[in-house]
Image (cartoon, helix red, strand yellow):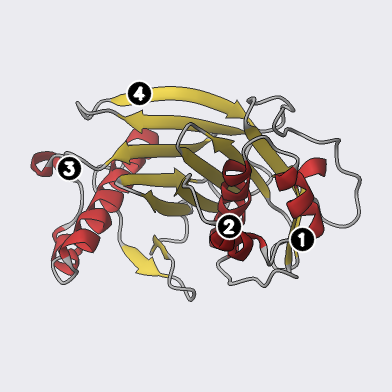
Amino acid sequence: MASHFVRWMGNPPLSSETTRVPQDVINSAGRLPDKRRGRFLAARELLAQLMLRVYGIRELPALIASSSGRPCFADPHLPDFSIAYAGNMVGVLLAEEGGRAGLDMEIVRAHSRQAQDALTQDLSSGEKAWINAQQDFMEAVTQIWTLRQSILKLTGTAESSNSLRLHPAAGRLRSSVYPDIQAVCDAEPTLVWSCALSPGSERLRLWEIDAQQQWQALRDVEMSKPNIGPRTLRLTSLPGERTLSAPEMGHP
């Protein structure tokens, strides 16, 4: 099976006439501020539609909060998922059965020199060297930030800079909390997204819901292939001290 990443631009909202979100979830959303309510419901409707598409489950299964506060299915036999927002875009990553998932999306923005320094001050020397070698500084910073956030969502912990290290030039990452992770990050013209998954996930299927609320298949990412896109970065960690492959991908 494949893992699935679907995203949707939250304007106009998904149709409430065909909602697959239970009434108790809708009632819970009613207690949230307007902006949060819309994103909360859109993410759960997106998750519900993904569960229908992949597993044939017609209504969103019951959700609970994990010990870290991250939403998950109450039934432990159902797959792991991760939710992310960027601007008015909502994204959901659904892992293969038994795997874990972490998703982050960020808009590439211009920042002052002071803000740039703040974004990079806790990065490793390897991360900074890779960023400085890229043609677009802020895009590269956003990729590293997005990769980190997706991994933190997978592990469910607030790791310190010392417990999570990225080595983008070598296509490697190392987490002292969860030692088996692979992550793929892509830079589009204004959006950077990163999907962190368990290493058993061999394929990532990318989907988008268009303005007519139709599902559009974007592409499949073969996680083991070295060349998966000109602006795509793939990092892997392996247990123990096994040798990793050469750099998977970087910017030209």
Task: Tell me the CA gap for discs 4 and 1.
Answer: 38 Å
Question: The C terminus appears in which quarter of the rendering?
Answer: top right
Nearer the observer: mark 2 or 4; the answer is 2
Label 4 sits on residue: 216
| Disc 2 crowd, CA 10 A, few/some/many (<14, 14-19, 20+) | few
**Which numbered dot is residue 54?**
none
Task: Tell me the CA gap for discs 2 and 3.
Answer: 37 Å
Circle nearer the N terminus (2, 3): 3
Task: Tell me residue 163's x, y (percent).
Answer: 73, 69
Asked whether, in this view, residue 195 is left or right of residue 42, the answer is: right
Circle nearer the N terminus (1, 3): 3
Which residue is found at the position 62% from the left and 30% from the top? Answer: 231
Question: The N terminus appears in which quarter of the rendering?
Answer: top right
Label 2 sits on residue: 113
Q: Is mark 1 on a helix, strand or loop?
A: loop
Which residue is found at the position 40% from the left and 46% from the top? Answer: 92
Instruction: Tell me: residue 126, above or below residue 114.
Output: above
- The amino acid marked with disc number 3 is Pro
Q: Hey, which residue is sitting farthest left in the picture?
A: 17
Task: Tell me residue 194's x, y (percent).
Answer: 55, 45
| Disc 3 crowd, CA 10 A, few/some/many (<14, 14-19, 20+) | some
**Which numbered dot is residue 124?**
1
Nearer the observer: mark 3 or 4; the answer is 3
Task: Tell me residue 189's x, y (percent).
Answer: 48, 31
Q: What element carries label 2?
A: helix
Circle nearer the N terminus (2, 4): 2
| Disc 4 crowd, CA 10 A, few/some/many (<14, 14-19, 20+) | few
Q: Nearer the viewer, residue 212 or 131?
A: 131
Q: Is mark 4 on a helix, strand or loop?
A: strand
**Which numbered dot is residue 13?**
3
Q: Hey, which residue is sitting farthest bottom in the picture?
A: 67
